[in-house]
Amino acid sequence: MFRGRKPELTYADVTPKELYFNRRKFLQAMGIAGAAALAGKNLIDLASPPRGVYAGAKFTNLTKSPFSTTEKQNSFEEVSHYNNFYEFGVDKDQPAKNAQKFRTSPWAVSVEGEVKTKRKFTMEEILKLAPLEERIYRHRCVEGWSIVVPWIGFSFSVLAKLVEPTPKAQFVAFESYWDLGQMPKARPELAGIQFPYVEGLRMDEAMHPLTLLCVGMYDDVLPNQDGAPVRMVIPWKYGFKSIKSLVKIRFVPKEPPTTWNLANAHEYGFYSNVNPNVDHPRWSQARERRLGEIFKRATLMFNGYEDQVSSLYTGMDLKKYY
Ligand code: MTE
């Protein structure tokens, strides 16, 4: 879609099970492990990049967040094999394949700009900043599909408060890791966007408790293709605001540039709030297809987080600030 494709999903897009069934048969035939051991998540472990780099083991003692939806979660397989991560290819199945060897350790995020205390946080430090919560969020892509994911992390505001933003800090600019050595597909001529991938939020949006600094999903560290080792998740905005593999955060006085706005300002604005009443210039945003389901459902205002976030936009014309 981003590159001019029809956003509509095919039935094959939402039924990855067959793929797994075939892979299981393949592995069984190869005699790698017995049928029982290959059932379910063990199978995925075989196909996924090394896990638990930072946690050493699965996360335990996660706090359950009151912000979680009770809607049915998508499977780990769906969420980790249907991705947008253009640094590793523009097709949905490419990040899972091409990001396998992406090195996410050691890792650090530098926090700069209009703050009293500029700081570089190692990944180990980030993991200790606050109790880790499980937050089950709806995640709506601008292309018209959605997923429900049990993310792990804590409110971005925890980190922001530590560096003490000055009154000049009106926006936050985010930047992803970019290394052509590890990401040979991350070139504008191949991906149709500029790199490094950049995103931004207004200060009040960034400080909203729903805005998540995310370090994991499904009780484990993030798979590389989902933005390891640390990403943002902003559940009331289209998925492209949720920038992956973060390396830099800058507090700034002016609205920062954002990747999709740079690529096509007419189609992608700075705010990108999920809004069923404002069509994308090339398609309606009124409905969406949950991955794994056949029938579409209505898209909710602010992706269902209207009660929590609508006050951030009081008095703003959301058709103008799309
Ligand atoms: N971040 C980076 N660095 N590069 C990307 O290509 N894609 C965005 C966003 N963050 C992207 C990114 C888009 S378009 C979406 S829909 C979400 O990541 C997808 O997140 P998911 O693959 O974990 O569902």
Image (cartoon, rainbow, N blue to C red):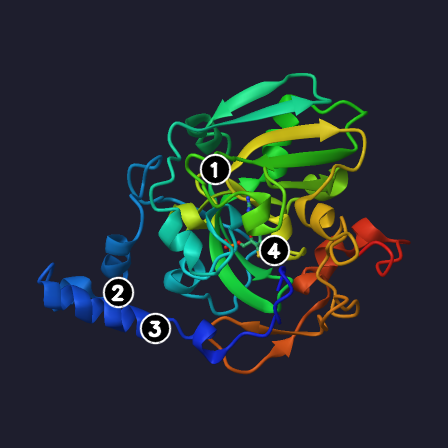
Task: List the residue tagged with mark 2.
Answer: 40
Q: Can residue 10 be seen in this view?
A: yes
The quadrant the N terminus occupies is bottom right
In space, the residues marked 1 and 3 are separated at their CA atoms by: 34 Å
Q: Is residue 234 visible?
A: no
Q: Earlier in the sequence, mark 3 or mark 4?
A: 3
Q: Identify the secondary structure beneath mark 2.
A: loop
Task: List the residue tagged with mark 1.
Answer: 131
Badge 4 density bin: few <14, some 14–19, many ≥20, Cα 10 Å: many
Q: Residue at x 59, y 45 (%)?
A: 188
Q: Which residue lies furthest to the front in this view?
A: 189
In space, the residues marked 2 and 4 are separated at their CA atoms by: 27 Å
Task: List the residue tagged with mark 3.
Answer: 17
Q: What residue type is labelled 3?
A: Lys
Badge 2 density bin: few <14, some 14–19, many ≥20, Cα 10 Å: few
In space, the residues marked 3 and 4 are separated at their CA atoms by: 24 Å
Q: Residue at x 49, y 39 (%)?
A: 230
Task: List the residue tagged with mark 4.
Answer: 239
Q: Identify the secondary structure beneath mark 4.
A: helix
Q: Residue furthest top?
A: 117
